[in-house]
Amino acid sequence: MPSYNAPFEIHVHGEVPLRADVTFAQLQDALKPLWKYAGAKSLADGAESSYEEEPGIKFDAPEHLLRMCWTVPGDEDFRQSLDEMCMSLNELAEQGAAIEVTFYDAEFDEEDEPPEGESRDDFVMLFVGPTPAAIMQVQRDLLVEDVIGLMERHFDGAELGGVVAEIDKLFSQRFDALVNSLEIGKPPRGTGGTGGGHGGGRRPRHLH
């Protein structure tokens, strides 16, 4: 359980589309690394953020959506809790989704620090999804959004189709490499092996 003298205030933000059959009990189990880190005994007990104005962790059952806008005091060891959470959320996610995590240096005081002092603030973008393809799709969409937003300062959007096509090519290569690496571990066809699919799911769709 982190103390209130923890070196960071850690903010978790994102929305994850869940399968329609996901129950609160399943979600509570998947998010156990978070609420347990906060020193709570259940999701209901630990869903409240350190800041009253933040909604915390919410299960929107009618929309099949996990909403997170939640802050907890902590340390670098919180990253392990995030890894465990993502592995569990992969099993419940309907689509790929991004989760933003910001580490704010709670011990850094800009007024009291020497000029050469630097904050330990950090930002991490995590991705969850039911398949590697679903996760890559979210990564691709965010990258396209960032690149187009940057380049539209200098070029008209209609001129950037080639840039998007190159980004799609890069993700196609990454996806194919992943599929090939998983195929290596499969028994050859006709040997009676029970190896399942390559696990990559559908190829990420390409938006033109």
Image (cartoon, rainbow, N blue to C red):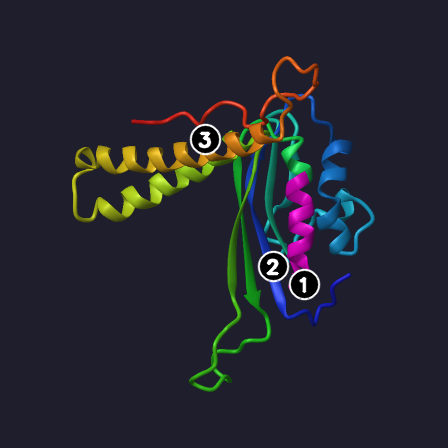
Distance from label 2 to label 1 (Cα)?
7 Å
Residue 90: give x, y in percent of width and height. Answer: 63, 35
Sequence-first disc among 1 and 3: 1
- Along the horizontal axis of the image, is 125 left or right of 171? right
Name the residue at 60% across, 59% down.
10
Residue marked by disc 2? 10
Residue 41: give x, y in percent of width and height. Answer: 83, 48
Between disc 2 and disc 3, the foreground one is 3
Residue 74: assigned label: 1
Residue 28: give x, y in percent of width and height. Answer: 75, 38
Between disc 1 and disc 3, the foreground one is 3
Q: Looking at the image, do the residues carrying marks 2 and 1 touch, with CB atoms under 8 Å apart? A: yes
Task: Specify the amino acid type for callout 2.
Answer: Ile
Name the residue at 68% across, 61% down.
77
Secondary structure, mark 1, is strand
| Crowd tier of the residue under label 1, counting other residues whose Cα lies within 10 Å: few below 14, some 14–19, many 20 or above | many
Magenta region: which residues? 72-87
Name the residue at 68% across, 69% down.
6
When the figure is inspected, residue 149 is found, relative to residue 110, above or below; the finding is above
Secondary structure, mark 2, is strand
Residue at the farthest bottom position: 114
Residue 198: assigned label: none
Distance from label 2 to label 3 (Cα)?
36 Å
Residue marked by disc 3? 176
